[in-house]
Each structure stands twice: as structure tokens, then as C-alpha cells.
Amino acid sequence: MNIRLPKVEDFSDRLRGPETTSRVGAMLGIAFGICFLTGLWSHLQYNPSGWLTIPASPAGLYRVTQGLHIVSGTAAIPLLLVKLWSVFPKLFERPPRRISRELVVHLLERGSIAVLVSAAIFQLVSGALNIVQWYPWGYSFRSTHYAMAWVAIGALLVHIAVKLPIIRDALTRPLDNAAEDHQLTRRGLLLTTGAAAGLTVLFTAGQSVPLLRQVSVFSVRSGKGQQDLPVNRTARTAGVLPKAQDAGWELELVFNKKSMFLSREALEAMTQSTVNLPIACVEGWSVGAIWTGIRMRDLAMLAGAPANSRMFVSSLQTKGAFGKSELPRQFVNNEQTLLALKLNGEKLSLDHGFPCRVIAPNRPGVLQTKWVTKLEVFA
Ligand SMILES: Nc1nc2c(c(=O)[nH]1)N[C@H]1C(S)=C(S)[C@@H](COP(=O)(O)O)O[C@H]1N2
Ligand SMILES: [Mo]
């Protein structure tokens, strides 16, 4: 048998070509752009830096930015696949034989594309695996996903700059070349690709957009769950049982090295407020709910702290990074920020954070700490 490597000419180029690639590339560029910017925003919400104060309002802002992040990232998957397919034959282009300027240019171009393709695939795959909470890797998802975002966006900008003459030329050329009857045209290919990306959005966006929930069969989390809210981690898997059920549980409230202790009954006897705020998970799902509890600023005042204080929150959960969070001043101050005792009119269920949990406006879900046991106030 005669085995040989394929050559560029072996691939039919009726549908492929710069006209196709540049148009799919433009769609992909937009998706990656949105994904990058909303990702940066999410990163800032997790790691507030000195020069930027994250506002507590609009309350649903993170819900929108993170929903967009996941939707644009998901839409990028079919777009990336078609884009790679459209340039696939180039993989078999032979580099210049001799050591020459052309060879160097060729290798540099190929190298930058290799970086871009691997970074793009890594981002989409690691993001998708994070959504289904499968961590087959041994490194921190967040710092790696963040670092690779810069690699991907840098390589993307270099790629666009290098290809700009070709892109500009191809975008102004008509899309379609001659096709026989009943053959797929390039326009048809582009429409199919756009439709695939659109359907991907429709099938997943329901986890962020309540109106779409009925059609979003691929949503990882539906709106359902105990008390009409999905449970991200149960009390059992967080290892807070049996402490969370202990009748002798008390909240420790600390200011200036002085502690006071409040039972659930004592908390229930304080002035209660009710707010309508979403849990907006970094995984893209978000669900609005009605929360009732004590304003954090009332608790800070009770502890004897001055107005405009900040707080450290500790959970009964001691393992993992989710058992602690910090509430910056603008969140403690906000009248919507509660130590919640009730959810949708019922006593908080164990899995939603009983005996009490944090709920604050415009925050990533992961900072809405459940099973709170200690609040430390700092002036
Ligand atoms: N102590 C603790 N609090 C936690 C978590 C956790 O694992 N442990 N998960 C967080 C995440 S990632 C989200 S999205 C929300 C989900 O809240 P729910 O399970 O009540 O819907 O809780 C947050 N609070
Ligand atoms: Mo989350």
C-alpha cells in the first residue's frame, strides 16, 4: 500500500478559503473579545485591586457580566471548530526547504498560530470543565485560566495584526464562489455556523436568562433545587455536618478583640429585612431569590464598630477556599447586604447555608458564604 502524507491540494477548497476563514474569524474575535473583557471583570471582583472599588450596585451586574462570559465562551466552541476546519489543510503546507528568511518567517507565523490555537482550546476546555465541576488537573483553575487569557488575547492580537492585509482583502471579496446545484455554498456554511453558535447560546443561556430556561436543555443547572434555588455544594460535601445542625450553634461577632455570641433565636429577634437578590455563580448560572435576615451594617453596629467598617466572614466549613470571604466596606454598608436566615419565605435549608449565610448585591456566588459561624468587623 502506498501511504503518503496529504498535500494542501488534496483538500477541496470550494468551501474553504480566506473569504470563509476571515468571516468566521470575525465572529470568533467578537466572542473572544466579550469573553476576555467579562473575564477580566470577574477576576477584579474576586481580587479587588486598590485602584478600583467594585460597586454594590447595580445589584444584578455580575449576573449579566458572568452570564455573558459563559454564553460568549460557549458560542466560541462551534466557531473555533469551524475556523480550525477552514484552515486545516494549511497544516500540511511544507515549510521552505532551505534555511532562509522565508523559513524563519514561516516558523514564526506557525509558532504564533500554535500558541493561539492551544491557548484558545485550553481556555474553552478548562472553562467548560469548570462548569461541570470536573477538575482532572492539579493546578488552580482560576489563576491558570486568568494567565492563559492574556496569552490567548496577546496571540490573537498578533495574529490579527499579521493577517490584517489578508483579512481586509478577504472581507471585501464576495463570499461565494461557483457551486453546483444542491451543493453547500460558503454562505450556507457561514449561516450554518452562525446558527450552530446561536443554538449553543439558546441551549445554555437559560441558566442566566430566566425567560430561556424552558428551551435551555443543555443548562448545567436548572432553576430547580431545594427552595427553588440550585445547590452548588451540599452541607454534607462541605463537611459542615453535624455542626450546622447543632442546637447549641452560636454566631461569634468580633470587634476590637471582643467577642459576642448570638444564637439563632437571638438573630431572629433582631430587625429583619427582606431583599430580592440573585445568586450569580461564576459557572454562569444565576437565579433570583427572596432573602430575609439581618442587615450586616446593623450587626457591625451591634458589635460597636464605627460606620463604614469591613468584615471577614468565616464558615463552619474549614476545608477548601470557599469557607472564608471578605466583605469590603461598600458591601457592609449597603442596606441590601444581609446575614440571611430565610430563603423564599422559608427557614434556610441546610444545603443553602443554615443556620445563616451571606447575601450581598453584585457579588460572585462563591463569595456568598454559607454556614456562617463568625463575623469579624474591622474599622
Ligand atoms: N461555605 C461555603 N459557602 C459557599 C459555597 C461553598 O462551597 N462553601 N459555594 C459558593 C458558591 S460557588 C455559590 S454559587 C453559592 C451557591 O449558593 P446555593 O448553593 O445556596 O445556591 O454559594 C457559595 N457559598
Ligand atoms: Mo459558584
Image: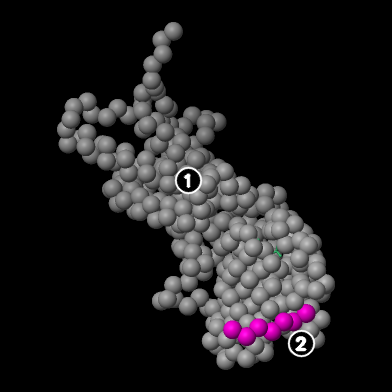
Magenta span contains residue 260: yes
State the CA–CA distance, disc 2 to disc 1. 50 Å
Sequence-earlier tag: 2 or 1: 1
Q: Amino acid at mark 1?
A: Phe
Magenta span contains residue 160: no
Q: Amino acid at mark 2?
A: Met
Residue picked out by circle 1? 122
Magenta range is 257-263
Residue picked out by circle 2? 270
> Helix, strand, or loop for circle 1?
helix
| Residue lying furthest top | 1
Spot occupied by residue 60 in the image (x, y as percentages of width and height): 61, 72
Name the quadrant containing residue 358.
Answer: bottom right
The residue drawn where x is 39% and y is 56% is 150
Q: How is the image coloured?
A: one colour
356 vs 123, nearest the viewer = 356
